[in-house]
Amino acid sequence: MNKIKFIFFILLFVIVSLKYGSNVRGFFLKYTNSTLVAYLELKETTKESISEHFDQIEKIRELEAINENLDSSIKTLSAFASKLNDILKAEDIEKYEPKVKLVSSIAYVNLNDYYKVWINYKDFNSSRIYGLLNKGNCAGIVIEKNGNPMALLLGDPKSIFSVFIGSNKIPGIAMGKKNEVHVKYIPSWLNPKKGDKVVTSGLDDIFFRGVGVGVVTKVIKEELSKTAIIEPYSKINIPSYYHIIEKN
């Protein structure tokens, strides 16, 4: 009986194919194409999801490695700070307890000036000048304007602070010059050179001593002093967050 039914359906299919061949083929072709497109789209979506998943796993691993390094650095610095404060205590000197705080940038002060940025900092003291850090390097200073905290980034000519150049700690005053920093008023008898690293001196009560500023690219002899041209570590790209130095 089953064989008879099978033969019947085969004959029926042949008859329908002969009479309505193009329509039947068109129907099956349309159905097959739709199924194939859906399959390919599903395959691509699945591939992208898998790729995104593995990218996230890799990013998590990178962040975990960074956190491990930071944790190690924090422990080392804590031990160093503890030892330092023991020495200060023995010498009857006030405990050294610097503080920084994470703050966010809000907007440019002027749309045509990329070196001035409003900062969201609720504990701002308008009588102070604050040091600003980006990824551990000097990013500029924060001053008061119209009662609000305004960041003058390194390229601003009014972003001024004291620095040391090279291993001999040659003193100078850093000020912005667009994508450069110029260290001026270097005594003429001292000899900074290309490749010297520049760090904050901490003598102006704005930054800690030793915060990275940049590298000397050129030295210019002035009439009574020298000027060093610096390529800064912190570039013009405006990050969303900085660290502000609350206490040196």
Image (cartoon, helix red, strand yellow):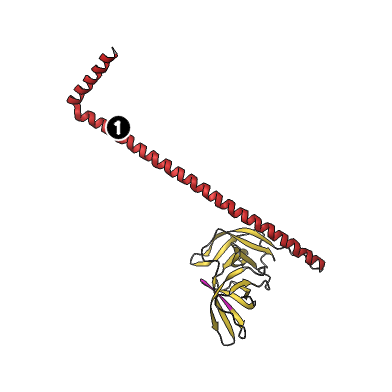
Residue at horizontal 58%, vertical 83%? 226
Residue visible at 73% across and 62% down? 81
Picture layout, residue 59 above or below residue 212: above
User: Left or right of 50: which side holds 18?
Assistant: left
Of 227 and 13, the residue lying toward us = 13
Q: Quadrant of the C terminus?
A: bottom right
Q: Main secondary structure of the magenta part?
A: strand
Q: Secondary structure at mark 1?
A: helix
- Residue drawn at 55 percent across, 50 percent down: 61
Q: In screen coordinates, is 14 left or right of 197?
A: left
The three-letter amino acid code for the residue at tag 1 is Tyr
- Between residue 1 and residue 240, name the one nearer to us: 1
The image position of residue 144, as x and y in percent, is 62, 67
- Residue farthest along the front direction in this orientation: 3
User: Residue 202, how many percent across, how many down?
Assistant: 67, 71
Whole-percent x and y of residue 89?
80, 65
Quadrant hosting residue 210: bottom right
Range of residues picked out in magenta: 179-183
Above or below residue 201? Residue 188 is below
Residue 179, horizontal then vertical, whole percent = 51, 71
Query: For the N terminus, which image quadrant?
Result: top left
Q: Is residue 94 magenta?
A: no
Q: Nearer the viewer, residue 151 or 169?
A: 169
Residue to which mark 1 is pinned: 31
- The residue under the point 57% across, 80% down is 227
